Image: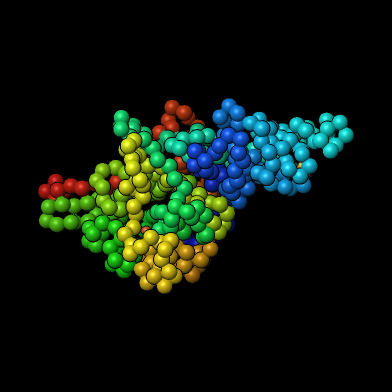
């Protein structure tokens, strides 16, 4: 099959991916007077919250001699590097160099540490790391809007939806392997059902009819299952640029999806998962959306042999290597979604290289609510189109 070999290095190096807002940390973990570190798109960041409550992010390497600023001190207004005491405000201006004559007044204005705007939404902190003149509006997602009176948003950076665990935050392989997995409905039928036992709803054992379509924001698959003489199910799962998923409930809770996930590149061989989901305000324990797979015991407690015998998403994606080698694959008709995605990625990269804006960004605050479109849509067979 032609045209499928996307060098992944290219994907992480392009404006198409840097010109978006990226999840950096759960917002409730960005504390005042405490510095945090995170790596996004290969850039080390120090993240904090100033005295006024506004989160900030700077490149986490002192411009003097490279000590990470997260090892320094923050007084609610300025950061002080622990090595020689240079100080910076939260927009990277150097305001003190205590070991220099006259505290560096003559030269310190020439130093400007890279800093990145941060915004909070849905309980998560987003950093924008693209060019200032291309800074888009941070969008809203309809799956997380219009909360009922008894609902709230729960946010997490657990790797649960890759088959991992709350304690595991950094996933050791390229982000695209993970994102592509969400446009592969056939692995639900085999890996999660026929091969490793029924890890999702038992109805996943019904062989689906699958089609993929491009959308305004990316692409989606529609997996149609004829459950019995009377009931049919359309399982609609979108991929949204640059790195979003909105996977329908795998236990087949009916209706539109109430979860949005972000597959965030840390570097070429590591990524993170962030999720926000609608939950009841009086939620006790974990949200139902986080009970993803039924396995004999939690993944974190499984031995290597047990994982090998009963693999799930983690094992499938990890075994592709730190960066899957596309030239070794043999994509087939059931991989149509993956080839469509790679084609769209390449096309969008080209667009950005030519100076245009990719899909999935808006510069208009009045037009910033995006539709996710995923869900489990049941219908009676009688009502189905002929
Ligand atoms: S390395 Fe930061 S002040 Fe010297
Ligand atoms: Fe899966």
Residue 265 place in picture, x, y as percent: 53, 51
Residue farthest right in this picture:
101
Instruction: Left or right? Give the position of 366 relative to 40.
Output: left
Name the residue at the front extreme: 284
- Count the marks: how many? 0
Quadrant placement of the N terminus: bottom left
Q: Is residue 107 in sight in this rendering?
A: no
x, y (%) of residue 282? 32, 37
Q: Residue at x 14, y 57 (%)?
A: 228
Q: Position of residue 369 (x, y in %)?
A: 40, 33
Query: Which quadrant of the view contains residue 339?
Result: bottom left
Residue drawn at the location 73% of the way across and 41% of the way down: 81
Q: Is residue 12 left or right of residue 180?
A: right
Q: For residue 122, which quarter of the picture?
A: top left
Nearer to us in this view, 49 or 377: 49
79 or 173, which is in the foreground? 79
Residue at the image position 36 percent from the left and 35 percent from the top: 152
What colour-coding does the image apply?
Answer: rainbow
User: In what quadrant does ligand 2 lie?
Assistant: bottom left
Q: Can residue 156 be seen here?
A: yes
Q: Nearer the viewer, residue 291 or 209?
A: 291
Q: Position of residue 65 (x, y in %)?
A: 77, 47
Residue displayed at 58% across by 47% down? 38
């Amino acid at each position: 099959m032609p045209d499928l070999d996307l060098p992944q290095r290219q994907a992480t190096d392009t404006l198409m991916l840097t010109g978006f807002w990226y999840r950096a940390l759960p917002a409730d973990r960005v504390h005042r007077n405490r510095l945090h570190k995170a790596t996004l798109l290969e850039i080390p960041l120090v993240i904090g919250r100033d005295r006024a409550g506004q989160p900030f992010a700077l490149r986490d390497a002192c411009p003097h001699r490279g000590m990470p600023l997260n090892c320094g001190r923050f007084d609610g207004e300025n950061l002080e590097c622990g090595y020689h005491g240079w100080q910076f405000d939260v927009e990277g201006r150097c305001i003190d160099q205590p070991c220099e004559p006259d505290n560096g007044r003559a030269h310190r204005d020439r130093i400007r540490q890279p800093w990145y705007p941060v915004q909070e939404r849905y309980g998560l902190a987003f950093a924008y790391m693209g060019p200032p003149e291309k800074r888009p509006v941070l969008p809203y997602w309809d799956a997380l809007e219009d909360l009922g009176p008894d609902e709230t948003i729960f946010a997490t950076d657990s790797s649960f939806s890759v088959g991992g665990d709350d304690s595991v935050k950094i996933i050791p392989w390229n982000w695209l392997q993970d994102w592509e997995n969400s446009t592969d409905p056939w692995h639900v039928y085999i890996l999660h059902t026929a091969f490793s036992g029924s890890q999702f709803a038992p109805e996943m054992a019904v062989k689906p009819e699958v089609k993929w379509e491009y959308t305004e924001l990316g692409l989606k698959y529609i997996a149609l299952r004829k459950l019995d003489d009377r009931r049919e199910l359309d399982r609609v799962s979108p991929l949204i640029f640059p790195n979003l998923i909105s996977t329908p409930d795998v236990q087949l809770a009916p209706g539109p999806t109430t979860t949005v996930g972000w597959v965030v590149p840390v570097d070429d061989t590591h990524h993170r998962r962030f999720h926000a989901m609608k939950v009841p305000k009086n939620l006790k324990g974990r949200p139902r959306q986080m009970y993803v797979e039924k396995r004999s015991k939690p993944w974190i407690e499984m031995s290597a042999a047990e994982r090998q015998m009963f693999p799930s998403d983690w094992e499938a994606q990890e075994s592709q290597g730190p960066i899957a080698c596309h030239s070794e694959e043999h994509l087939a008709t059931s991989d149509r979604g993956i080839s469509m995605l790679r084609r769209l990625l390449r096309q969008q990269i080209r667009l950005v290289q030519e100076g245009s804006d990719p899909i999935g960004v808006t510069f208009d605050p009045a037009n910033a609510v995006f539709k996710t479109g995923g869900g489990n849509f049941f219908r009676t067979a009688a009502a189905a189109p002929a």
